[in-house]
Amino acid sequence: VTETFGTMLLGEGAINFVPDARDRLMKPGGTIIPAGGCQYATLVEIPDFASTVSPAACSGFNLTRLRVLQDTLYWKASVGADKTQFTRLSERVCILEVDLRQGTKDTIPLNRTFGLPAIRPGTVHAVLFDWDIWVDAERKDILSTAPGSRNFAGDVAWGWLLQIQEEVDERWQGSSLPKPLMVKQGDRLDMGVEYLARGISIHVRLRHSSATNSKSDLEGGVLPSLMAPSRMHGVNRGDLLEASEYYLPVAGDQGRQAFYQTLLDTAIVRNATMSSEQTVLDCSGNAGLPALFASKQHGLHTLAMTRRNEFARVLRQVAVDNGVEQLMEAYAADPRDLIEILLPLEKRADIVVVDPPGTPLHGLSPFALLPVIHERLLKEGGQVVPGGACFEVGLVESHDLAQMFSVPHGRWEGIDLTVWNEEARRQGVLERLVPYTKWFGSHSSMKFKWLSEPRCVYEVDLSSYGRQVLPAEIELAQSVVASSDGQVHAVVGRWVVWESLDNRDSRLDSESDYLGRALTWPHYVQAVAAVGTESGVLDPVQVRAGQRLRLSVVVRQGKGKRTGAAGPEFSMHLDGSVAPTARNQDEGSARQDL
């Protein structure tokens, strides 16, 4: 028996070890479960996903050049527990059938070509990969990862993949900028499939069929390797990976960009430094758009900082495309390494733009940057955008979420699994905040309910953070009122930002219908268990509407912290739940930097 499958059917290499176990360890006439399976591919139009990797124009700016960061060959989005709408533009095609009773790694082809018609008009944004496995040759009992076939936990465990697509020529080559692949109903397409490492990874390319296409392709002949588009040659793979997962989704977040533009407008008009030539240093992960906005709309000299060479190169081209190459510069470096002579007009900036706390972009945490910004990069009296932040916390009921960190009631189908809950406790699941993206977003299929409105438990003045020594540890008490009857499975936190702590008219938080917001804005989850709960069970805390509970929050900074990461650390305890153990308090193994 094996269940060692990945999001791709052979993603965990089952075709390498199952035949070995079958040939050496199974009795003659024995049974293999599952007997086999099939990897499927479907052409889909999925605009919400496409918007996260192909940002549209923002405030009239030409962002076409950002599309050069798309990886249409190697990168695949891992998707699960998601209710994003999509349209199938082809039938579901089995591109690799695996017989675990007889097959070996040598039965996996190098590549194949499939001919398939478009069943309706649209734009092929991606190829969707999912799989089926069956118990025996009769294929009567099938387990599938097709969207909608699994519950939340199963969808998170396996999910499905999306590989973005572009139009390619007869030689399977893309262009200098990805072009959308548009089809009409009945159009014939060739789908070239390459099986890497014996099917552990699969790449797909699509082209319109024509009489001049190689006949051997359509008969399953061996194809040339589906090489990456020439625009990707020599580019660091890490740059493209981070672009696909964070940089492009942030660039396409219209609400986020509008927030930053509003705050920049206000800061520039205020001109707190009374400068005749204001300058802007953009240290955020907003795809250089704050710097572009300040240069294009206000004629200011700006510098956009990134941690990736390819980002900086593309941003310089974006500046040219928008006619601000004399005003806007982009460097690939850690902002903390800057010296004054490298700043716009070789002087300290009047305005510095930073990310919200909790950014998943490596090296751009405002808590890491602000001490240096105030020390040597920002003028005295200069402005930080945004200037105020707060960590909000609320109580959440979610059976789907609880299944991610515990076995409900410690049992499944009569089997005692309390040992797993005991291990979860030993690992500190009740004593640490764990960051999650996707699950709390508007496109997630996770069912959850706020049992108390998220409220601010700790404010940070970003405009002055890093200027003074903060208390090593403070303890705060928050009164939490349950808004309805329910079961508290977790305490959940999230960051929000404003123009300043004094002006909260403009607010940016995790709430958005845009898919990319959930991909780039984490929530922090600390599981809870009711007092008196046995060690092998994690029962939730029961509450009634109007009930007041005390939430204790310990905030550690500087020398009081348990880790070396920048920013405050939080430890929480809800009345009526199991308290943190002295062992984990001493070891600090359950603290999460935010």
Image (cartoon, helix red, strand yellow):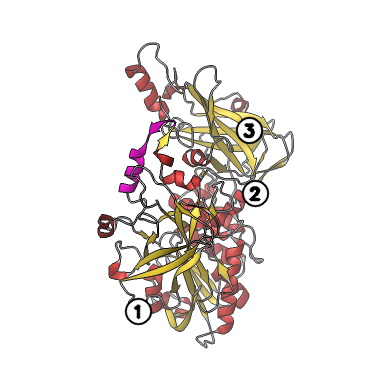
Task: Determine the image quadrant of residue 193.
Answer: top right
- Span shown in magenta: 413-427
Q: What residue type is labelled 2?
A: Pro
Contact (Cβ within 8 Å) of mark 2 with mark 3: no
Structural distance between the alpha carbons of marks 1 and 3: 63 Å
Give the labeled residue for mark 1: 468
Task: Locate residue 385, reporting x and y percent.
Answer: 51, 74
The residue lying at 36 percent from left, 56 percent from top is 432
Label 2's element? Answer: helix
The location of residue 354, given as percent across then percent down, is 47, 69
Q: Which amino acid does label 1 sit on?
A: Gln
Q: Mark 2 points at which residue?
A: 47
Q: Where is residue 65 in the image (x, y as percent from the top left)?
A: 59, 58
Q: Is residue 419 magenta?
A: yes
Along the line of sight, which residue is nearer the eye, 294 or 459? 459
Q: Name the amino acid type tagged 3.
A: Asp
Mark 2 or mark 3: which is in front? 2
In which quadrant will I find the C terminus? bottom left
Residue behind mark 3? 190
Marks 1 and 3: which is nearer the front? 1
Q: Residues within 10 Å of mark 2 (few under 14, many from 20)?
A: some
